[in-house]
Image (spheres, grey):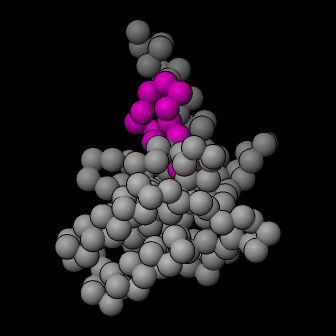
Amino acid sequence: MRNLAFIFLLIIVSVNAQKKQIGVYKADNGVTYKLKDKITLNVGSDTDGTFNYVTMPLVSGDDKRGGRHLANSLFKIIGIEKYSGKKRTGVNIVAKKGLGLIHIDIINAIRTCEVTPCTQTSSTSPVVINESDKYDKLKKLKDLYDDGVINKDEYEAEKQKILASEK
């Protein structure tokens, strides 16, 4: 049993050796992400609305990708990691909301507009939002306002954007 624990610890150390904790990351979308800042998810970039670059590490099985229920959610940044390996390099943001924990591949999440603001190019087609998604967005926006996360002006501006995107 001790040998198994030692091997597990060795694996964790070797995996983490390729990661470097950083406190601040200036992204391509012009935002500087820092610990304790808030980050807002947009909608998932997959055709079914799930997230390709937001994962839930505490979920077991094949359902690690963030589901549609995370759309328009606000999370608090608790960690920023710069990683490099043979196949990939990038920046991972660890964030939480209540007891929920997510990992965001921030470079790709910005590129695909899974976080806001994003750097979506004009060649990318806009996300089509169905009626239930519109009402979900409005409800989540109202919850943010009621919780004091955003002020009345921000609430009204975002509400108008959601309503305008439907026309």
Residue 165 percent across, percent down from the top left: 53, 73
Q: Where is residue 147 in the image (x, y as percent from the top left)?
A: 20, 71
Instruction: Name the residue: 47% across, 44% down.
Output: 67
Q: Nearer the viewer, residue 64 or 45?
A: 45
How many numbered marks, from 0 up?
0
62 on left or right of 45: left
Q: Where is residue 152 in the image (x, y as percent from the top left)?
A: 27, 87
> From this viewpoint, is residue 19 visible?
no
Q: Is residue 125 left or right of residue 110?
A: right
Q: Vertical placement of 3 versus 6: above or below?
A: above
User: Residue 10, relative to residue 32: is it above or below?
Assistant: above
Residue at left offset 54%, top offset 74%: 167
Along the line of sight, which residue is nearer the eye, 56 or 89? 56
Q: Residue at x 53, y 20 (%)?
A: 7
When asked about the image quadrant of residue 122, the answer is: bottom right
Q: Position of residue 97 (x, y in %)?
A: 31, 56
Q: Is residue 69 visible?
A: yes
Tell me where the magenta segment starts and ends, as one range: 53-65
